[in-house]
Amino acid sequence: MGLMAGIAEQGLDGSPAPSAVHRAMDEDECRHAGEATGGGACLDCRAVPDVISFARGAPAPEALDGGLIARCTDSALAADPTVILSYGTGGGYPPLREWLAAHHGTTADRVLITNGSLEGYVFLLETFLSPGDLIGLEAPTYDRALLQAQMHGMDILPIPMEDDGMDVGALAAACEAGRVPKLVYTIPNFHNPAGTTISLDKRRALVDLAEKHGFWILEDDPYGRLRFEGEALPSIYELGGPEKVMFSSSFSKTLAPGLRVGYLIAPAELVKTLTTRANQTYISPAHLPEAAVFKVCEDGLLDPNIARVTELMRVRRDAMAAGLHHMPDGTRCTPPEGGFFMWLELPEGMSADALLPVAQDSGVIYVAGSACFIEGHHNTLRLAYSGVSPEEITVGMERLGAVFASG
Ligand SMILES: Cc1ncc(COP(=O)(O)O)c(C=O)c1O
């Protein structure tokens, strides 16, 4: 994968065979996917009283501002009770669609609000793509994006990752060899799980390649606003334009995942099709949380909240980086400049999959990186610093170091 400096300078990478045990990369994730009980650790994990979870790619409790959401829900309801409390359009709460359109320099008929951003991706798999179509996925990628592509019968083109994001050269070579995907799905900033950010040159090269071979790009960017240092880069959507690039994001990481508000920006005709699909599936998405999010945005409260959450995450990233010295010699890692995750590549021969039960017995859990690849990469793991306190991170890294020393 060509990632990263040695651990002394900080660093990570990984992958597994998609087993139920090793999936579960976000939200309710413990390592026992399917057993999770809706928010906390699963019963098995709770059996270890002080298990520290580096598996949950969710914001820490301090990041969730209940007062803010309550105030904005109240004022939204006071302003627009009938629309909010009635069935609505499948495309989402109209004022939020308008706000998002203006924010992204487009029109509301190109915006679809979904129950979390993953749903927009799934709708694309079901409508824009057909079983057997070739989809380009970074390797590693967000495990649910991989899982859904597999569940929908896609032909998957894995695109290797490097320190500065997807290996666009490898994608170009695949295209030259006749493997041209219909859609390339990419997570541009503070990648889940790799932690990387795709460079400006590669963003441009990817757009050029899409133009040359006629494929679409889906840029999924839930973490980009959570930057600790460095300059934000132009989005691939901005560089490539709306006739080549679709864009999705979410308020799960910047406000609260329980709101379940995400969105997709796509060509108007496609949004129309997806809106019909949404309408046929659930009539309309939940307008109350969307209206609360609209109030947060309209009243200028989103940016201050993002600044607050970013600082909470920065402190956690620093605490985890400080604990990397507990990892075995030869461990590699790309330190993220934002977001929720660190990605570790253990020395060859070590298996993060095999060591996971040992880690759990020692009171710390993570996601085996193999869940993020079609196969292999058993020496990799994802550590989320987002959901735990800096003190827990310090203790968790010590525990992890002891587990890996024993393996
Ligand atoms: C890259 C990526 N996309 C999408 C999602 C899904 O987010 P949402 O809660 O909006 O469905 C996640 C959640 O972890 C993610 O990491």
Image (spheres, helix red, strand yellow):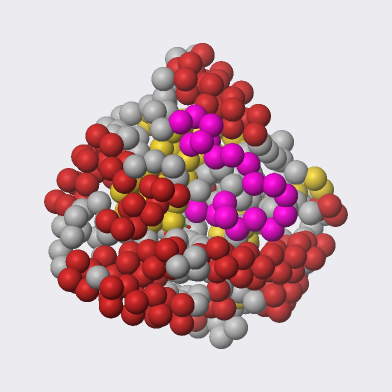
State which quarter of the image contains the N terminus: top right
State which quarter of the image contains the C terminus: bottom right
Residue 192 lies, with reference to residue 359, above or below; the image says above
Q: Residue at x 57, y 55 (%)?
A: 225
What percent of the width, then of the height, locates residue 216?
41, 29
Residue 378 lies, with reference to residue 326, above or below; the image says above
The number of numbered discs placed on residues in the rendered structure image is 0
Q: Residue at x 49, y 29 (%)?
A: 240
The quadrant in which residue 81 appears is bottom left
Q: Who is closer to the viewer here, 241 or 257?
A: 241
Q: Residue at x 72, y 54 (%)?
A: 229
Quarter of the picture for ligand 1? bottom left
The quadrant in which residue 402 appears is bottom right
Say whether residue 214 is left or right of residue 169: left
Q: Is residue 8 part of the magenta span, yes or no? A: no
What percent of the width, then of the height, locates residue 200?
65, 34
Q: Is residue 234 part of the magenta span, yes or no? A: yes
What percent of the width, then of the height, locates residue 364?
62, 72
What percent of the width, then of the height, locates residue 403?
71, 67
Say whether residue 15 is left or right of residue 144: right
Query: Residue 318, can we see it?
Result: yes
Q: Main secondary structure of the magenta part?
A: loop
Query: Residue 406, can we see it?
Result: no
The magenta stretch is: 222-241
Q: Who is closer to the viewer here, 79 or 337?
A: 79
Say whether residue 278 is left or right of residue 253: left
Query: Which residue occupies the extreme bottom position in the image?
Result: 49
Q: Residue at x 28, y 78 (%)?
A: 78
